[in-house]
Amino acid sequence: MSRLQEACDRFNEHFKVGDEVLYWSGPKEGDGKRGVVSYPAQVMGGHSPVVYIKGKGAILLTHISRAPE
């Protein structure tokens, strides 16, 4: 199994479809935006571990954090 798929699998263990997260389109600077996981994480194009955020599209896993309660 590739390290990219392992990153997706770890993410999917902790975040489920419907979970609220914070995301950044670029570097993790500022407060981030709130979004909802709309599809489990997967490796896109064989090179990028991403998760789909409702209404936003694919975001790199490195640009996602758990939303505060």
Image: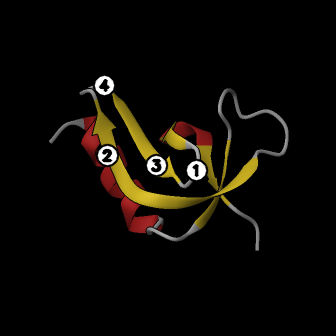
Q: Which of 20 and 56 is in front in this view?
A: 56
Q: Earlier in the sequence, mark 2 or mark 3?
A: 2
Looking at the image, the residue that sits furthest to the right is: 30
67 vs 40, left or right, is right
Q: Mark 1 points at which residue?
A: 55
Residue at mark 2 to residue at mark 4: CA–CA distance: 10 Å
Q: Are marks 2 and 3 in contact (CB under 8 Å)?
A: no
Q: Mark 4 points at which residue?
A: 47
Q: Mark 2 points at which residue?
A: 42
Q: Which of marks 2 and 4 is nearer the N terminus?
A: 2
Residue type of the residue flagged with mark 3 = Tyr
Q: Do the residues labelled 1 and 4 touch (CB within 8 Å)?
A: no
Q: Which of marks 4 and 3 is nearer the N terminus?
A: 4
Q: Element at badge 1? A: loop
Q: In which quarter of the image is residue 28?
A: top right
Of the numbered discs in the image, which one, if any, rests on residue 66? none
Could you tell me which residue is drawn at 68 percent across and 38 percent down?
A: 24
Of tags 2 and 3, the one toward the viewer is 3
Could you tell me which residue is drawn at 44 percent across and 68 percent down?
A: 17
Q: Element at badge 2? A: strand
Could you tell me which residue is drawn at 75 percent across and 48 percent down?
A: 33
Residue at mark 1 to residue at mark 3: CA–CA distance: 9 Å
Q: Is residue 53 above or below residue 25?
A: below
Residue type of the residue flagged with mark 4 = His
Q: In this view, does 26 lie above or below 69?
A: above
Q: Is residue 59 above or below residue 17?
A: above
Residue type of the residue flagged with mark 1 = Gly
Q: Element at badge 4? A: loop
Residue type of the residue flagged with mark 2 = Gln
Q: Is residue 18 above or below residue 24?
A: below
Q: Mark 3 points at which residue?
A: 52
Could you tell me which residue is drawn at 46 percent across and 49 percent down?
A: 52
